[in-house]
């Protein structure tokens, strides 16, 4: 099993920055694919950034169009931690951010939200205008 815990949410003004952390433990094979999702009340959960393990210390990353150029996903394999650096934040970035993982063996399986079997409890990000 995989356990995930998010840290780093908070409140900032538009244009500010936050860095989220996701600390992972448990089955390494169940974490071949890891990502960040966000959800606001009344909205469907949105995929923000996804990473797929291509080597022991190598990850491919894909970002959603809405955060491309502003957010960066990175992995620290030694610390078992995934980060989401969020810069130039906008009010529409407000939401609960979740870390998730699955054991996919291909990009196609990785990006399918239905395949994410491990989820953190979420951390609130609020961006004021």
Image: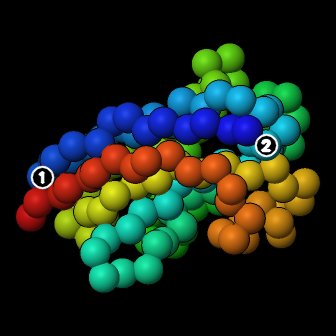
Is 3 left, or right, of 45 in this rendering? Answer: right
Report helix, strand or loop for mark 2: helix
Which residue is identified by label 2?
Answer: 30
x, y (%) of residue 94? 26, 63
Residue at coordinates 46% horizontally, 53% vertically from top-left?
Answer: 98
x, y (%) of residue 43? 36, 81
Residue at coordinates 74% horizontally, 52% vertically from top-left?
Answer: 102
Q: Residue furthest left?
A: 129
Query: How much space separates mark 2 and mark 1, taking CA atoms?
Result: 36 Å
Report helix, strand or loop for mark 1: strand
x, y (%) of residue 87? 33, 48
Is 11 left, or right, of 56 in this rendering? Answer: left
Residue at coordinates 69% horizontally, 24% vertically from top-left?
Answer: 77
Comes first in the chain, label 2 or label 1 = 1
Viewer-nearest residue: 72 or 79: 79
Is 84 left, or right, of 53 in this rendering? Answer: left
Work out whether residue 10 can be spotted. Answer: yes
Viewer-nearest residue: 120 or 11: 120
Work out whether residue 72 can be spotted. Answer: no
Q: What is the total number of numbered labels drawn onto the structure image?
A: 2
Q: Residue furthest top?
A: 78
Where residue 50 sits, quadrant-wise, is bottom right
Quadrant of the drawing holding the C terminus: bottom left
In the displayed structure, 11 sits above or below 28; it is below
In the displayed structure, 104 sits above or below 84; it is below
Residue at coordinates 61% horizontally, 36% vertically from top-left?
Answer: 3
Which residue is identified by label 1?
Answer: 13
């Amino acid at each position: 099993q995989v356990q995930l815990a998010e840290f780093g949410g908070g409140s900032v003004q538009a244009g500010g920055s936050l860095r989220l952390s996701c600390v992972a433990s448990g089955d390494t094979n169940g974490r071949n694919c890891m990502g960040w999702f966000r959800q606001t009340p009344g909205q469907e959960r949105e995929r923000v950034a996804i990473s797929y393990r291509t080597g022991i210390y190598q990850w491919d990353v894909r970002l959603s169009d809405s955060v491309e150029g502003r957010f960066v996903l990175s992995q620290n394999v030694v610390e078992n931690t995934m980060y989401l650096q969020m810069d130039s934040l906008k009010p529409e970035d407000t939401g609960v951010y979740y870390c998730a993982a699955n054991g996919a063996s291909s990009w196609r399986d990785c990006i399918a939200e239905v395949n994410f079997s491990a989820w953190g409890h979420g951390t609130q990000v609020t961006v004021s205008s």
